[in-house]
Amino acid sequence: MTSPCNHQLVPPSSSNAVQQYIAAMRTAYALGAHTAETTFYTPFANLLNTIGERLKPRVHFQAHPGTHGAGLADGGLFPLSRSSQREPLPGQLPERGAVEIKAPGASLASLAQSAQVRRYLETYGLCLITNYHQFQLLKLLHDQPHILESYDLTSTAEAFWHLAFSELVTQHDQTLPDFLMRVMTRKVPLEKPKDVAWLLASYAREARARAATHHLAAFDGVKSALQESLGIAFEGDKGEHFFLSTLIQTLFYGIFSAWVLWRRTPEGRRRSEYRRARALARAQKPTSQQGSPAVDNTKGQ
């Protein structure tokens, strides 16, 4: 995309960013006076910036952040340090990745293989691609675009415009912000237990939401084994909810416990010290056209 976004970004007043996003998208669509793609930039930017405000340091979505020899991306993700520079920093790159947007219903598979997205991946390392209702975070792996994570509000544009509003909001009001925060912090090393706990909790919430709508036959054996060993029965909707919540919580707590134990090993301590040294070196390196300021490696919830 080459045309600039001229809309002023006004942060939503509601704390429910997903509700505000879907409502604003549907309002623009219902007016009928919209372009296929650029009309919807403002609700999308508001969504990202509302989510970015929850992080430390804050992460800001900037539309059309310059070319840097890679072409003009639709947007970029920039961490905002606590000590903001008063003067603009020339040549600053979107440290947390580029963003490329296509019209609702557009194929993300085709976009991921495009030459423009490859240039963004080569230059910025990460690229979030979206058609407003589907999202994919990409990086190059073995010289090919690789999906690190994906998220669907709906599988089709038709469903995005017409599915029951309350149902769509309820289903995604926690898990879409979780996904976007993981996108914005993908490049941040995980050093603190609270950051790992948050990350795993976000995946657990998404796993719980998916399990509620996608029955897995593989769970039946686990359920039967638990019922027999504990002498209890998971009956009805409440029983099924309790079983899935218990199973997912146990699995992710096990992963967290394994990380804590690994970090206490000599290898875990060495890697932690190496990452701290890298972070310190970056913090002491002056800003130039080749990069952006060092960032605080903490995450917010």
Image: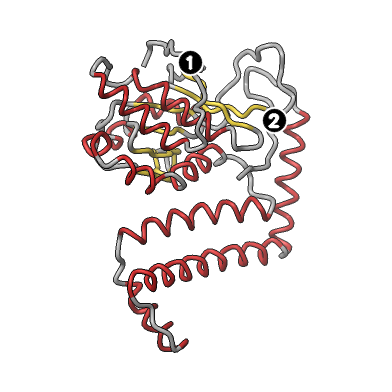
Pick the quarter of the image with the N terminus. Answer: top left
Q: Is residue 32 left or right of residue 202?
A: left
Q: Which residue is mark 2?
A: 294
Pick the residue in front: 187 or 197: 197
Using the rendered view, name the quadrant where residue 133 is placed. top left
Q: Is residue 82 left or right of residue 216?
A: right
Amino acid at circle 1? Thr
Q: Residue at x 61, y 29 (%)?
A: 79
Q: Residue at x 57, y 40 (%)?
A: 185
Placement of 149 over or under 57, stated as above or below = below
Amino acid at circle 2? Ala
Q: Residue at x 59, y 37 (%)?
A: 54
What is the x, y in percent for residue 100? 40, 27
N-term mark: 1 or 2: 1
Q: Residues within 10 Å of mark 1 (few under 14, many from 20)?
A: few
Pick the residue in front: 78 or 266: 78
What is the x, y in percent for residue 137? 43, 39
What is the x, y in percent for residue 263? 69, 61
Whether the residues at callouts 1 and 2 have beta carbons within 8 Å, the answer is no
Q: Quote the CA–CA distance across marks 1 and 2.
A: 21 Å
SS for dot 1 = loop
Using the rendered view, name the quadrant where residue 210 is placed. bottom left
Residue 148 at least partly seen: no
SS for dot 2 = loop
Using the rendered view, name the quadrant where residue 201 is placed. bottom right
Pick the residue in front: 113 or 33: 33
Pick the quarter of the image with the C terminus. Answer: top right
Q: Which residue is mark 1?
A: 67
Residue 291 at least partly seen: yes
Q: Residue furthest left?
A: 158
Q: Residues within 10 Å of mark 2 (few under 14, many from 20)?
A: some
